[in-house]
Image: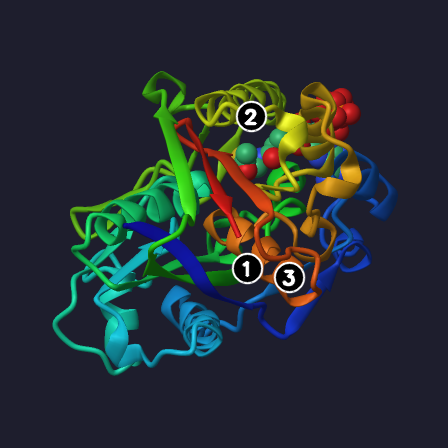
Amino acid sequence: MYSRITGTGSYLPEKILTNHDLEKMVETSDEWIRSRTGITQRHIANTDQKASDLALFASQEAIKAANITSKDLDLIIVATTTPDMTFPSTACILQDKLGVDNCPAFDVQAVCSGFVYALATADKFVSSGKCRNALVVGSEIYSKILDWNDRNTCVLFGDGAGAVVLSQSEAPGILSSHLHASGRYKDVLSVSGSIGDGAIQGSPYINMDGGAVFKFAVKVLEDVVREATEENKLQPSDIDWLIPHQANVRIIRSTAQKLGIPLDKVVVTVDKHGNTSAASIPLALDIAVKDGRICKDQLVLLEGVGGGFTWGAVLLRW
Ligand code: ACO
């Protein structure tokens, strides 16, 4: 028994914030942001929208594309760093919004690697026969944890959601998944705040050593792609589509170059929505599925890295 992605969906909030809009908010320029990151615009959720609302739109699309109904789901996993509330989990809130009851639902917190972690987890449930259809979502509202006066961070991120349905299949499907973490880098990229004594203890905003993130990301993304291809007796050049975490076009290009993967085999969407953390991989996947780039039987490699540090990859046959 294998698991296979049978439907994808995504959602980006209506409001668009361009680099030119940001020029009016902090000392920056469209040229600086584009040349350092490749980002031209990002989407920003309304103040009344929560991660579960974005997740709902993406999930409904994925469920429809999989040709099932929400009642056919027997597992829901949401990867998010920006949950609706401390608890219950965003997955439980999403389950209620989908009108489903009783199936297990939980969140995964692995920051920008969250979707890869969630997909790898769902694969274990589906391929072992415990579940028939799992909904795996990445949903984030980073606009709520950005200091809009800090040009080092506020230009990089955006809001959005992406979702897939993972179903039982006799043919692969997911070939392998590879997860890693190194908590000793926990201070390089963090939101240190937590709730205590009736207030936020620590900072409610993202704090990041951008240069350190960049170097670490390029190294581990190359390593994990090699690990995934070696385990499957493949070369990186055998991959039809590399779908990297959409953090920065320079990280994406450097990784592809080190692996010898031509850029026309790499799905890049960061220009249109910035870094949407756990949502970025399923967003990019959905866009490439819908525009017809990803075709049946192709080899697709999803790879991500994020705060923790966490990193990982999932190799699959479409
Ligand atoms: N506009 C203008 N200037 C800026 C801005 C801005 N928005 N932000 C920083 N600067 C300034 C800095 O203050 C610094 O000025 P100084 O030299 O006077 O001190 C200078 O620009 C730094 O410039 P560079 O060294 O050329 O910047 P660099 O090439 O390192 O790019 C960046 C910075 C984009 C943050 C890069 O390090 C990066 O992308 N790092 C990865 C960060 C990332 O992706 N984080 C996402 C979370 S983790 C993840 O998703 C994997």
Residues under labels 1 and 2: Cα distance?
A: 35 Å
Q: Splitting the image into 4 quarters, where does residue 17 fall?
A: bottom right
Question: Which residue is at the front of the view, 66 or 158?
Answer: 66
Q: Where does label 1 land, which residue? A: 159
Tag shown at residue 234: 2
Kindly identify the residue that appears in the image at 33 percent across and 22 percent down.
183
Image position of 180 with respect to 86: above or below: above
* Label whose residue precedes the other's in the sequence (3 or 1): 1
Where disc 3 sits, the SS reads: helix
User: Dividing the image into four equal quarters, which quarter contains ligand 1?
Assistant: top right
Local SS, label 1: strand
Crowdedness near tag 2: few (<14), some (14–19) or many (≥20) residues, C-alpha within 10 Å: few
Residue at left offset 16%, top offset 77%: 101
Callout 3 amino acid: Ile
Count residues near mark 1 (Cα–Cα under 10 Å), then give few for <14, some for 14-19, many for 20+.
many
Contact? badges 3 and 1 (CB < 8 Å): no
Residue extending furthest right?
Answer: 31
Whether residue 268 appears in this view of the structure is yes
Measure how far apart labels 3 and 1 are at the Cα level.
Answer: 16 Å
In the rendered structure, which amino acid carries the disc numbered 1?
Asp
Label for residue 50?
none
Q: Is mark 2 within 8 Å of ligand 1?
A: no
Q: In which quarter of the image is residue 151?
A: top right
Q: Name the residue under label 3.
A: 287
Of marks 1 and 2, the one in the foreground? 2
Circle 2: element type = loop
Which of these two is toward me, 298 or 101?
A: 298
User: Which mark's residue is nearer the viewer, 3 or 1?
Assistant: 3
Find residue 108 and report its horizontal and vertical position in percent: 30, 47
Which residue occupies 84% across, 48% down? 30
Q: Earlier in the sequence, mark 1 or mark 2?
A: 1
